[in-house]
Image: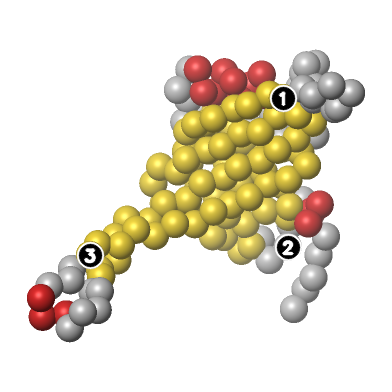
């Protein structure tokens, strides 16, 4: 089993088939998988719940240090804002910075963007993407 530093996990984003660029000054990223269930319990279930598998979904969330100057080589919070306001579908990849093992790829929509600045604190941003369609896992 390979153990690696969590700093190696990155998220890259692109809208409308553009080039995917990693998130600017990211400090954390999360890929969440969800599976809904359908309750099929009846009076014949003997007091236990019966379920069927329902829809599956996934989401991405990330946090980073805020920068109001776009570098052009990363996906910046102002671009995330534009993706959200313009309702652009976003292509994303969740993987190790140095390709190894496999990567996850999918599409979704930015559903939240938050920019925070506390007193005597570094300003930060956080964002979330909700999936549309299937998530693929590809060997690299």
Image position, residue 128 (x, y; %): 56, 37
Element at badge 2?
A: loop
Element at badge 3?
A: strand
- Residue at 66% from the left image edge and 19% from the top image edge: 78
> Residue beneath label 2, please?
100
> Residue beneath label 1, please?
116
Q: CA distance from mark 1 to mark 3?
A: 40 Å
Q: Residue 85 or 102: which is nearer the viewer?
A: 85
Q: Earlier in the sequence, mark 1 or mark 2?
A: 2
Q: Earlier in the sequence, mark 3 or mark 2?
A: 3
Q: Residues within 10 Å of mark 3 (few under 14, many from 20)?
A: few
Image position, residue 56 (x, y; %): 38, 56
Q: Are marks 1 and 2 in contact (CB under 8 Å)?
A: no
- Residue at 79% from the left image edge and 70% from the top image edge: 3
Element at badge 1?
A: strand
126 left or right of 137? right
15 left or right of 87? right
Q: Residues within 10 Å of mark 1 (few under 14, many from 20)?
A: few
Q: CA distance from mark 3 to mark 2?
A: 39 Å
Which residue of the protein is positioned furthest toward the bottom in this rendering? Answer: 46
Image position, residue 117 (x, y; %): 77, 22
> Residue beneath label 3, please?
39
């Amino acid at each position: 089993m390979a153990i690696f530093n969590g700093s190696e996990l990155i998220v890259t984003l692109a809208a409308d088939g553009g080039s995917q660029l990693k998130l600017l000054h990211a400090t954390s990223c999360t890929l969440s998988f969800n599976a809904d269930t359908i309750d099929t319990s009846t009076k014949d279930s003997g007091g236990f719940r019966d379920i069927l598998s329902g829809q599956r979904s996934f989401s991405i969330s990330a946090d980073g240090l805020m920068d109001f100057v776009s570098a052009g080589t990363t996906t910046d919070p102002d671009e995330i804002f534009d993706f959200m306001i313009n309702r652009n579908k976003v292509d994303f990849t969740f993987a190790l910075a140095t390709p190894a093992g496999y990567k996850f790829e999918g599409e979704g929509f930015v559903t939240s963007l938050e920019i925070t600045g506390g007193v005597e604190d570094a300003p930060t941003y956080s964002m979330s993407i909700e999936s549309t369609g299937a998530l693929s896992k590809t060997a690299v």
